[in-house]
Image: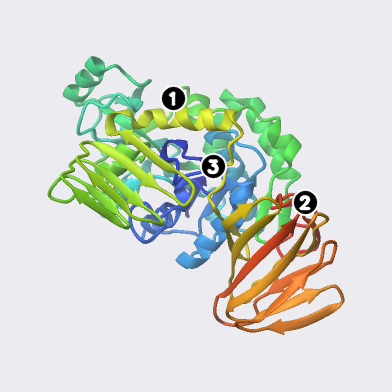
Amino acid sequence: MLIPLILSGGSGTRLWPLSRESYPKQLLPLIGKRTMLQETAARASGLPDLAAPIVVCNESHRFMVAEQMREHGTTPQAIILEPVGRNTAPAVAVAALVALDRARKNKAGNDADPILLVLPADHVIRDVAAFQAAVVSGSVAAAAGKLVTFGVVPDRAETGYGYIRRASGDGPTYPVQQFVEKPDAATAKSYVESGEYYWNSGMFMFRARVFLAELKRHAPAMLSACEDAVAAATRDLDFTRLAGEAFGACPSDSIDYAVMEKTDSAVVVPLDAGWSDVGSWSALQDALPRDDQGNVVTGDVLVEDSSGCYLHSTSRLIGAVGLKEHVVVETKDAVLVAPRDRVQDVKALVTHLKAQGRGETALHREVFRPWGSYDSIDHGDRFQVKRLVVRPGATMSLQLHHHRAEHWIVVSGTARITRGEETFLLGENESTYIPVGTKHRIANPGKVMLHIIEVQSGSYLGEDDIVRFEDVYGREGTTK
């Protein structure tokens, strides 16, 4: 049995302002209509002896991950929530423990030690058939107890990736001779010319028990913390919530450092499938088709005498005149402008924004919730205007605010309103008022999206002025 293990815990700060802590790049449709998470799930479908995937994600992303899997038509066997990020080795360890526990409970027999195919959720692979062929080739070694990694056949001397050096062998898998850090330009050139080195893709395949045995051998404290976190995990709707204290005590390390560089059982499968980790705006530009002037254009963009640019509009017109090799990315609340050869410095820009306490590093103006989304259209002294979109059948929490009143106007759809002891329906062009301190809730009983304009007024309008009493999404006592 082959279980895709999708790692969806990254923040993707180099793709700011599109990618943010609360809505990172793997949840965005950067390459096509599907999000990168959905693309990752899709490229695994069609592999032989395939089981439902396991997804490991940040706790704050749980509802978006679940909704995107649902939209894709995929039901994960588990969505594991990390209370804090601890890098890839602990993420894989807890997934391996959960997979083995499920196999034991299901009396899996010969499948009691499933093969895990570890896939970061934020990669691009253009040639899915070549990727699947590499997985099939590597599965033989994985079934035999090897720890398989996929080495990308390099097409240039790249200094931004780590490399894997293969030892001699007959293929299609080769023993790993050495993992090497990111090289300088001259060293990278010699690696590519030798034909013995591959880019480290961060994708792996191995039996769950084999990985855990190697982790116990090389990082026993990490395994012990992960075992404690899984043993004390709780079920929350469709999620497996790891024990926060136990997982927080786990050492943080990557699979490479914790296991792969130390084991004597590592093998590499060459992968030539148009792979990219989309680690920067220039990498994203390279992964997309260009026009005759070498530009990649998304959204409402007008170009005049510009070439080699990545131009992305989300909500308004971008006009570009005389730009060469630049990146311009517009969102509702931020605009990035940078020379293409400086896009790696976006991460430093985000660090500066965090130091200033700017919310644009974490949230977009439009914020997604399990019931839908809200968009802060306007705000000023003692007022704020939001556009609420509530999915069919969805229900907000029963809540109150101590410092603000709210006026609701239904633009389209039908709303079922709870206000104090009353429950009533509001249709299009109808409105109501929620006084300060009054319990209230909005539900969408219809079959179409419900759109509401909300006008808040009061002395304090922060999102933390929420007291939740009931919530179908298990968020009682939280403000998210």
Residue 98 seen from this side: no
Disc assigned to residue 459: 2
- Mark-to-mark CA distance, 1 and 2: 63 Å
Disc assigned to residue 281: none
- 1 or 2: tag closer to the N-terminus: 1
**Which element carries disc 2, helix, strand or loop?**
loop
User: Which residue is at a point 71% across and 69% down the rendered structure image?
Assistant: 407
Amino acid identity at mark 3: Glu
Q: Residue furthest left?
A: 292
Amino acid identity at mark 1: Asp
Which numbered mark, 1 or 3, is in the foreground of this view?
Answer: 3
User: Which residue is at a point 48% across and 67% down the rendered structure image?
Assistant: 71
Disc assigned to residue 360: 3
Number of other residues with Cα within 10 Å of mark 2, as a class: few under 14, some 14 to 19, many 20 or more: few
Number of other residues with Cα within 10 Å of mark 1, as a class: few under 14, some 14 to 19, many 20 or more: some
Q: x, y percentage for residue 392? A: 59, 76
